[in-house]
Amino acid sequence: MFRYILRRLIQAALVLVGVSVITFLLSYALPADPARMIAGRSATPETVEKIRHELGLDRPLPVQYFNYAWGLLHGDMGRSYVQKTEVTTLLKSRLPATIQLAVAGILFELILALPLGIIAALRKGKLTDQLTMVFAFFGVSAPQFALGLILLYFFGYRLSLVPLGGYGTLKHIILPGLTIGITGAGWYARVMRSSMLEVLSQQYIRTAKAKGVSKWAVVTKHALRNAILPIIAMIGLDIGIFMSGVVVVESVFAWPGIGQMAWQAIQLVDIPVIMGVVTVAAVAIVIGNLLADLVYPFLDPRIEYR
């Protein structure tokens, strides 16, 4: 297990280096000029060149990346061109809200999808199965901004059960988390149903049934532990996706996560902030996948890492 974790950590480091290089090159390939964006349209060429020199943008691209990577190794993600604040400080101020939204979204996905997927598999071809697939299709197809506005209108405006927006309490997170949960639960329910059907057709399941094991025990003790493995992998990916910020949901519910900050940085060509958000997302995806792999042996003893 130790050798496997060490090997995965080395692979993760290479992935992060690759992501940083590609993101850095793409950021500087943009047609917009950060110095011009900061100086304003009416600024003189001399002013623009002065700002470019202060930001180090007049140096060769390899030198700029080396300086950025060296600072990153020491915990320095640079300084925002626009807000004149350390990127690390900006991320720290936004990450708590993003983490809360990510956790709420994943919980709602699991709460909605797992029971529906299991029930649909157990009642294959029946009305329950068909209704579950209709819900899954709706969840996959529904735009997050439309679903969020509908939930906000009924539960926030008409019924006044939750706040219309903002951040800080449990009530504030219900609708944003539910919006993410419904759209993600469609995928989870379909995958859970397919995985459950495949596991239920295995020989050891038929053997357990022949021995008189109750249906509930067959599902929970034998089938579920193997059928849920694809869901664990999806959770690992979702951690990274949600940690990079769900821009649409954050905008609808005025949620102060890093998604809004990233969108504003893209509009203003604030490269250090863009790089910081991408780095956080890449680290989250790597950690999520690693955690998912480490959970597998506990669910299925047949899986062994060397």
Image (cartoon, rainbow, N blue to C red):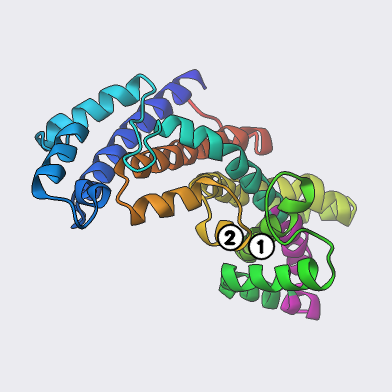
Badge 2 amino acid? Val
Residue segment shown in magenta? 110-131
- Distance from disc 2 to disc 1, alpha carbons, whole Å, reads 8 Å
Q: Nearer the viewer, residue 136 or 122?
A: 136
Residue 221 covered by magenta stretch: no
- Mark 1 Cα within 10 Å, few/some/many (few <14, many 20+)? many
Query: What residue lies at 65% left-to-right and 34% top-to-bottom?
Result: 301
Query: What residue lies at 43% left-to-right and 49% top-to-bottom?
Result: 262
Residue 303: give x, y in percent of width and height.
Answer: 57, 35
- Mark 2 Cα within 10 Å, few/some/many (few <14, many 20+)? many
Indicate the quadrant where residue 94 lies: top right
Q: In terms of secondary structure, where does tag 1 sit?
A: helix
Q: Nearer the viewer, residue 186 or 302?
A: 186
Residue 216: give x, y in percent of width and height.
Answer: 87, 53
The residue beneath circle 2 is 249
Vertical order, 48 against 305 (above or below): below
Please report contact status of discs 2 and 1: CB closer than 8 Å, yes or no.
Answer: yes
Q: Nearer the viewer, mark 2 or mark 1?
A: 2
Sequence-wise first label, 2 or 1: 1
Compared across the picture, whether 209 is left or right of 13 comes to: right
Residue 269: give x, y in percent of width and height.
Answer: 29, 50
Say if residue 201 shows up in the picture.
no
Query: What residue lies at 79% left-to-right and 65% top-to-bottom?
Result: 119
Q: In terms of secondary structure, where does tag 2 sit?
A: helix
Query: What residue lies at 55% left-to-right and 60% top-to-bottom?
Result: 251
Q: Nearer the viewer, residue 122 or 160?
A: 160
Vertical order, 93 against 4 (above or below): below
The residue beneath circle 1 is 179
Badge 1 amino acid? Thr
